[in-house]
Image (spheres, rainbow, N blue to C red):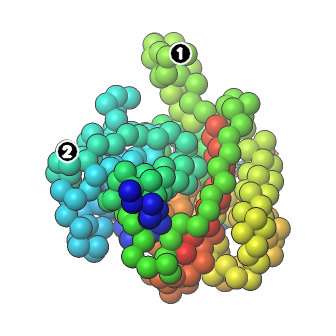
Amino acid sequence: MNTHRPLAEIWGIEDYFPAEVLSNTYFEKTLETNDQWIQERTGIRERRRSQAHETPGFMGTEASKKLLAKTGVKAEEIDLILVATITGDYIFPACTSVIQRDLGAVNAFGFDLSAACSGYLYALETARAYVESGLKKRVLVIAAEKMSSILDYQDRQTCILFGDAGSATLVAPARSSESRIIDSILRMDGTGIPCLFMPAGGSVKPPSVETVQNREHFVKQEGRSVFKRAVQDMANVSVEILERNKISPSDVKCFVPHQANIRIIEAARERLGMPIEKVALNIDRYGNTTAATIPTALLDAERKGQVKKGDLVLLASFGAGFTWGSILLRY
Ligand code: UT7
């Protein structure tokens, strides 16, 4: 019997961003808002918007193709595809089916995972469990969102916040003890549902003329309540994971928080005592891309030289559900 338990490592990450840039001034034309308010209250300068063909399935496939080329792994070698998204190509089948087909990952099975802004952490943890159990060896974790498909462009409180993006992460057995996923804490509090959700389109309220007229197929958010919980829970869970692993914030090379609002990130960073130079930030250029913020910000940090292989990295998220958590890893 093989008693050796493999560790799981991130072998690589790639991203895909639509070319169309929506700057803050774009919204000034149709809404009572302005660039200064958006930058000061959120830290966002611009975000990307997809064209019709740029679905999460498409963006996830494109990011995966780049990732396979970068890591030298063949599509046939992928044995599991997990897709973190709340804006999948269809209600059913899963977005995973689209990516499995378009990538030609003929030996993979997979499923979608709906955990909103914590989707990447939930999926990474699932990938880790499959790899560490020895059940799967090459797991693609896709985090991709077409938030523009569920945004109400008449609602200034939400439409300015979100953007579209795709990413792919390869999780596989660790090649050395230097890089591995170390620990995770994932949480959920379903009482938060009414604070951030899409009221219609599911089985509670199937689509009807009335739901469309009432604009219920869009993101609804109670910004202030979500803000308070995000600050508190993202900071607490980050402190908790460091404490239980006896790691001081000064040992962490890069902190990668979910990118929803620069003020939430600032508050969490301060609570952790993490200097700003160690924080991965891409909210200014891409806004809140829901499941895709953490992998794209982590890749961005790698490209900037903020993080390299083997460095200690702390990921943290908070989102609809409520869902939140943190993952500690050696990159
Ligand atoms: O990723 C999932 C988790 N989501 C989050 O973490 C988001 C959490 N929430 C937030 O980031 C913030 O609450 C928002 C950015 C959504 C809102 O910022 P805020 O500082 O909490 O603003 P507020 O909701 O307290 O509103 C302050 C004022 C209001 O006007 P009154 O009532 O004071 O007259 C809003 O109507 O700002 C107004 N306002 C705007 N003004 C200009 C709201 N949106 C806008 C806007 N432009 N786009």
268 displayed left or right of 114: right
Pointer 2 residue? 101
x, y (%) of residue 283? Answer: 58, 64
The N terminus lies in quadrant:
bottom left
Q: Report whether residue 143 is seen.
A: no
310 displayed left or right of 82: right
- The residue sitting at 76% across, 65% down in the picture is 244
Q: From the Cβ of disc 1, is ligand 1 less than 8 Å away?
A: no
Outermost residue on the bottom side: it is: 305
Assess disc 2: are there few (<14), some (14-19) or many (≥20) residues with their C-alpha within 10 Å of its C-alpha: few
270 or 4: which is nearer to us?
4
The local secondary structure at tag 1 comes to loop
The local secondary structure at tag 2 comes to helix
Q: Whole-Å distance between the Cαs marked 1 and 2?
A: 31 Å
Above or below, 225 against 25 in this view is above
x, y (%) of residue 161? Answer: 59, 52
x, y (%) of residue 57? Answer: 31, 46
179 or 141: which is nearer to us?
179
- The residue sitting at 66% across, 54% down in the picture is 185
- Tell me whether the residue at label 1 lies in contact with that at label 2, contact meaning CB atoms closer than 8 angstroms: no
Pointer 1 residue? 205
- The residue sitting at 28% across, 73% down in the picture is 71
- The residue sitting at 46% across, 72% down in the picture is 299
Indicate the amino acid at tag 2: Arg
x, y (%) of residue 298? Answer: 51, 70
Which dot marks residue 94? none
178 or 317: which is nearer to us?
178
Above or below, 99 against 92 in this view is below
Tell me the mark number nearer the camera, choosing from 1 and 2.
2
N-terminal of the two: label 1 or label 2? 2
Assess disc 1: are there few (<14), some (14-19) or many (≥20) residues with their C-alpha within 10 Å of its C-alpha: few
Indicate the amino acid at tag 1: Lys
